[in-house]
Amino acid sequence: YCKTYMGKEKLVTLLPKFDKSSVLDLLNLTQEASSLIYRKGNIPLSDIPDISINIKTLDSSGILSIPALLNIARFLKISRFIWFNLYK
């Protein structure tokens, strides 16, 4: 179960790990994420818009619509919120 488009894309390619070092590394990442969430509270990941189509449009020298620009602005605002609340 995933709330974000990024999580859904990652879930489709997810494969089990069998070597001990990979499992331990992933467990450490999980523990670090749990600790951050416990200390800082929930992160608004479900609010992150999918801007991949907008990025592709820009890569091909296209023009973005107002809603697309607003989605990018929301993406950047949430990214800044996450950065300042987790890493500062």
Image (cartoon, rainbow, N blue to C red):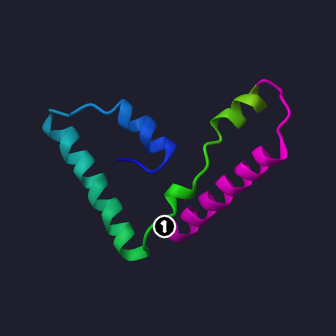
Q: Is residue 10 above or below residue 47?
A: above
Q: Is residue 9 above or below residue 40?
A: above
Residue displayed at 36% across by 29% down: 13
Whole-percent x, y for residue 5 in the image: 50, 42
Q: Is residue 73 left or right of residue 62?
A: left
- Residue shown at 15%/33% (left/top)? 19
What amino acid type is highlighted by mark number 1?
Answer: Leu
Badge 1, how many Cα within 10 Å: few under 14, some, many 20+?
Answer: some
Which residue has dot 1 on it? 86
Residue 69 rendering spot, x and y as whole percentages: 79, 47
- 10 is higher (above) or lower (below) than 82: above
Task: Confirm whether the magenta stretch covers residue 55.
Answer: no
- Name the residue: 65% across, 41% down: 51
**Left or right: where does residue 5 sit relative to residue 71?**
left
Query: In which image quadrant can residue 73 be found?
Result: bottom right
Q: Is residue 62 left or right of residue 10?
A: right
Seen in the image, is 14 located left or right of residue 42?
Answer: left
Q: Main secondary structure of the magenta part?
A: helix
SS of the residue under disc 1: helix
* 22 or 55: nearer the viewer: 55
**Relative depth, front residue between 14 and 26:** 14
Instruction: Examine the structure image and report whether residue 80 is included in the region drawn in magenta.
Output: yes
Where residue 40 appears, as percent x and y from the top left, is 43, 74
Magenta residues, start to end: 60-88
